[in-house]
Image (spheres, rainbow, N blue to C red):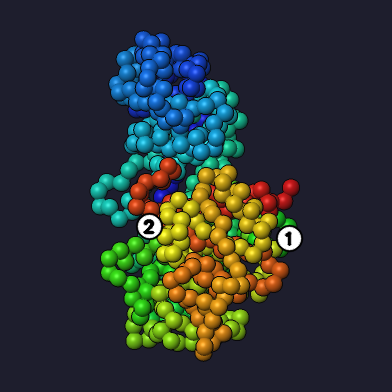
Amino acid sequence: MTTPITITATETDLDALAGADGKLAILVTPDGKLDQAARRINRLTKGAVARLIASEQWEKLKSGEGYVMGFPVGLAAEALCVTKLDRRPSVTEARKAGAELAKFKGDAGLILAAANQGKMRDVALGLTLRAYAFSDHKTEDQKPAQAATLMVNKPDDLTEDLAQVAALAEGVFFTRDLVAEPSNILTTQEFADRLEALRDLGLFVEVLEEDALEALGMGALLGVGQGSDSPTKLAVMQWNGGGDEAPLALVGKGVVFDTGGISIKPAAGMEDMTMDMGGAGVVAGVMRTLALRKARANVVGLVGLVENMPDGRAQRPGDVVTSMKGDTIEVINTDAEGRLVLADVLWYAQDRFAPSAIVDLATLTGAIIIGLGHDNAGVFGNDDAFANRFLKSAAAEGEGAWRMPLGESYDKLIKSQVADMKNVGGRAAGSITAAQFLQRFIKEGCPWIHLDIAGVAKVTTETALAPKGATGWGVLALDRMIRDGYEAE
């Protein structure tokens, strides 16, 4: 697994700044007032910092952006980054500043001198998340262990914050690694093995094999994987840190590769279907973070692990399968397999754990990308208060999410002539009919959110906090929702 960089907080040492090698950075407010460390660096550089903040170049910078001085006079450092940051920056601005420092840092060591440490938690998180790189399969020399130092007035005050940052980063990185991993490596067995390793962190993990799934009547889930040599599995992860309260359930779609099955996808772009287990990846990342930070909450994560392949045994368009709930489903398109996976896992989660609420995540539809692009996940739900709680958490963490509609009028689009329902409803409102399908497997009275993350799980251009590729979207928002709404006092 990719390891987050190590960030250490130390007391500000003005004498050490002049002799620090590698990269050096300071934070300066837009009004240009310099703290003690910045004043010292300004003197060492013969007023270069003061000249910068009096320039038009400084005026053009937005909060969170920085200006790099190469090989500054008076300093041993190979470069100095002067970053503009408001005295009371938003979470987004503070994390952006950290992310800019990660790009500035490169492979070198970084010292950030900042007397004002009010937003250092978010700066450190941005720095950590943006320093991620997935290079497990490159044959060139691997990067050395990454490290950065925060020089602040009260380093002890940051100890707990940096531990929380490390826990969040490990969860996000775990998700990113899973999404980035090629499918010949991340088989259903390998995925299950990585989840079972979470027992070392205190999670209770169990993996249900195909015979157990068949005994439970999970015909919808098993039908998806019957054309693959990789066995279908259901992994259950429990974190019990909140007493006797009913758990929050997180359910993820874990299709390790999706060819579309008999309804095979076009060849162009099919290599991206390694990310079709993105929902399961987010669930795994959240569970890892909860365990690392010893969350005072009860949360159960369930992921259906399966591969969708064409084969002589594969499910065909026109087949009818029976779900664990007992409802029958006409399979119109075998490429609409994710909802079949989730249907059985959702029912099992409720049947076994009677959760207080349930969230499912899936790279479910291309339609959500048409509607929302790559900036927002689609949020569907049967309970306004629960949906709004998540939306508030996502906004607080800077993870884009947008509420989408549900309604009985969409049900007629998935009405089948030969079964209780069909698994697709045509091109119109494709992401909505998929959510409407899933809602049929939510028991009355159970608050539920469906997150369609097809557009945000993996992107083709870098984001503020991640390089091109897997983003880990959802780990921060769900962890925030759990901290704010489910942790015991």
Residue 100, quarter of picture: top left
Name the side, left or right, on which 327 lies relative to 60: right
SS for callout 1? loop
Three-letter amino acid code at the position of disc 2: Ala
Residue at x 68% of width, y 53% of height:
486
Residue at x 58% of width, y 44% of height:
396
Distance Cα–Cα, label 1 vs label 2:
35 Å
Q: Which numbered disc covers residue 51?
A: none
The answer to whether residue 438 is seen in the rendering is no
Q: Sequence order check: which comes first, mark 1 or mark 2? A: 2
Residue 259, quarter of picture: bottom left
Three-letter amino acid code at the position of disc 1: Glu
SS for callout 2? helix
Task: Give the answer, above or below, for where 270 lies relative to 72.
Answer: below
Q: Which numbered disc covers residue 245?
A: 1
Looking at the image, do the residues carrying marks 1 and 2 touch, with CB atoms under 8 Å apart? no
Q: Position of residue 464 (x, y in %)?
A: 42, 42
Front one among 204 and 50: 50
Name the side, left or right, on which 247 lies relative to 152: right
The answer to whether residue 31 is seen in the rendering is yes
Q: Which numbered disc covers residue 180?
A: 2
Q: Position of residue 206 (x, y in %)?
A: 56, 69
